[in-house]
Amino acid sequence: MHRRIEETALTNASASDVIAAETIAAISTPPGEGAIAVVRMSGPCAISIAGKIFRGKARPAQFDSHVQHLGEIITDSGKAIDEVLMSVHRTPASYTGEDLVEISCHGGTLVTAKVLERCLRAGARNARPGEFTERAFLNGKMDLTQAEAVIDLIRARTDLALRSATEQLEGKLGEKIRAIRDALVDLLAHIEASIDFPEDGIEPDEGAKLFNRLDSIREKITALLATADQGRILREGVRIVIYGATNAGKSSLLNRLLGYERVIVSETHGTTRDTIEEMVNLCGVPVRLLDTAGFRPSTSDVEREGIARTERSLKQADLRLHIVDRNAPRPVHFEQGTANGNEIVVLNKSDLPEHSDWQNFNALRISCVNEEGLDDLEEEIVARIGKQNLRPENMIAINLRHRDCLRRALDACDRARRGMDEALSPEYIAVDLNETLRAVGEVIGATGVEQILDSVFGQFCIGK
Ligand SMILES: Nc1nc2c(ncn2[C@@H]2O[C@H](COP(=O)(O)OP(=O)(O)OP(=O)(O)O)[C@@H](O)[C@H]2O)c(=O)[nH]1
Ligand SMILES: [Mg+2]
């Protein structure tokens, strides 16, 4: 009865058959100098390779799992390369699920490279980016959302992003996806039964129950999809674009919000020619701040291209900060965008006298020179972000890949729903539900494993 469902239930365990029995090695700490660096090996020969290159009181093959031992990495001829701490993590209780060896050596670039080279000469091969985590996934140590959380964890720039990545690493998103899959499999089983035993048919009250169950699945997918914006913000930050006429003080404001002189500020109009982007943490909200080329009629090709870029970035802004020099007359085409929830008009240079054009003009007043009003501006920004539901509070937040899978799932789910409404033959509904199941499964890597692995793990650094 479940034959059509089984086709899609390819699990990571079965995908693990494809792992070659190779032992991989990499430097797992960032390049450059540090007190220590870690070289890792994973695979069936990791411990025997460690035995060839390590000299200490005990041999790696005799080490207890997860215990560090002091010793030396030595050349073929027995010359010491570095004094190290080595630990073995035996399968399956290791990060990758395979035998794993960690060597903490001194953090010089040359020393670390030599330790890695010894591992390679003794039989390991260079790991590809993300290959350790990929093996952890293929060996069933984590689902794909957890593997992706490892990247998020490494890249997290705010406490909130870190907490969200940790929750995902713990498998919270995976749990939700599995619950949706289970409900789908259940529903499919019913529908498949009516295909296999058509004489029994689907009773009307049972039909209504199936409708409700499909609707509840649909709601769950929709709820997860709604977290996509928050996911983007946790990972990339709220996009705030600073724009306005030339010389209004846009670059000065970017520098103030960053806390250092990132951009050139000058009294020459048209100083900033390109968009400049920096991350800041505003009250726990990750923000991508963009400084832009100021608006003015220009005959210069370079400046016009800069202004075109400003216009493009405004289209993608979550929030716009329209900066105005209140000491200067009001620009001819000035539009007050305060009514629009995603724009804040800011009158800058409040340390200077106000031009009569701005009298009684209702807007925030700041000074980038004496910092007056900057706290109010930050408060207003955070409030606007909150109003637009951009403030990430939901700890489960999907990424772009998840969004793509879930959108496809929702489309197929809607087709199935329409099929039910139109009382189509159950075979047609089963096709759409199977497609929903497949697309939902892709989120955790339960189907279509091969195609998605490269795109997910390719984002990792080598050694992770
Ligand atoms: N008095 C005063 N001067 C300011 C203030 N903010 C900026 N300025 C000055 O205004 C001039 C222009 O500042 P910028 O920050 O370069 O202006 P911008 O909007 O980036 O200008 P473009 O890049 O040309 O579009 C500089 O001379 C700044 O020192 C302010 O709050 N008060
Ligand atoms: Mg500028």
Image (spheres, rainbow, N blue to C red):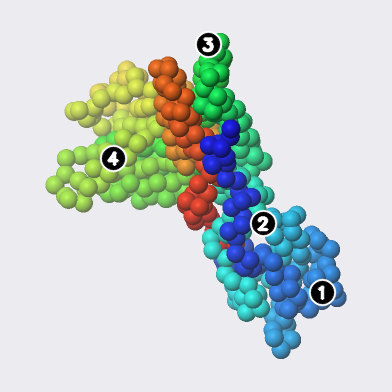
Task: Determine whether, in the image, residue 435 is placed left or right of residue 70.
Answer: left
Comparing labels 1 and 3, the label whose residue is closer to the camera: 3
Please rate how many residues cluster around mark 4, counting C-alpha atoms within 10 Å: few if below 14, some from 14 to 19, many from 20.
few
In the image, farthest residue toward the top: 205
Q: Which residue is mark 4?
A: 312
Identify the amino acid type marked 2.
Thr
Q: CA distance from mark 1 to mark 3?
A: 71 Å
Q: Quadrant of residue 163?
A: top right
Residue occupied by mark 3: 204
Query: Would you call the spot at circle 3 few (<14 residues within 10 Å), some (14-19), or many (20 or more)?
Result: few
Looking at the rendering, in which quadrant would you find the C terminus? bottom right
Furthest residue toward left: 299
Please tell me whether mark 4 sits on a helix, a strand or a loop. helix
**Horizontal and vertical percent position of residue 328:** 26, 32
Q: CA distance from mark 2 to mark 3?
A: 50 Å
| N-terminal-most mark, 4 or 3 | 3
Query: Which tag, 1 or 2, sits closer to the chain's start?
Result: 1
Quick one: label 2 or label 3, which is nearer the N terminus? 2
Q: Residue at x 31, y 24 (%)?
A: 337
Q: Check disc 1: other Cα within 10 Å, few if <14, some if 14-19, many if 20+.
A: some
Residue at the spot 74% in from the left edge and 59% down from the top edge: 91
Whole-Å distance between the Cαs marked 1 and 4? 62 Å
**Would you place residue 78 above or below residue 6 in this image?**
below
Q: Is mark 1 within 8 Å of ligand 2?
A: no
Q: Which mark is residue 96?
A: 2
Residue 315 x %, y %: 31, 35
Identify residue for label 1. Answer: 59
> Which tag is nearer the camera, tag 2 or tag 4?
2
Spatial CA distance of label 1 from label 2 is 22 Å
> Is residue 403 visible to the viewer in this orientation of the structure?
no
Q: Secondary structure at mark 2?
A: loop
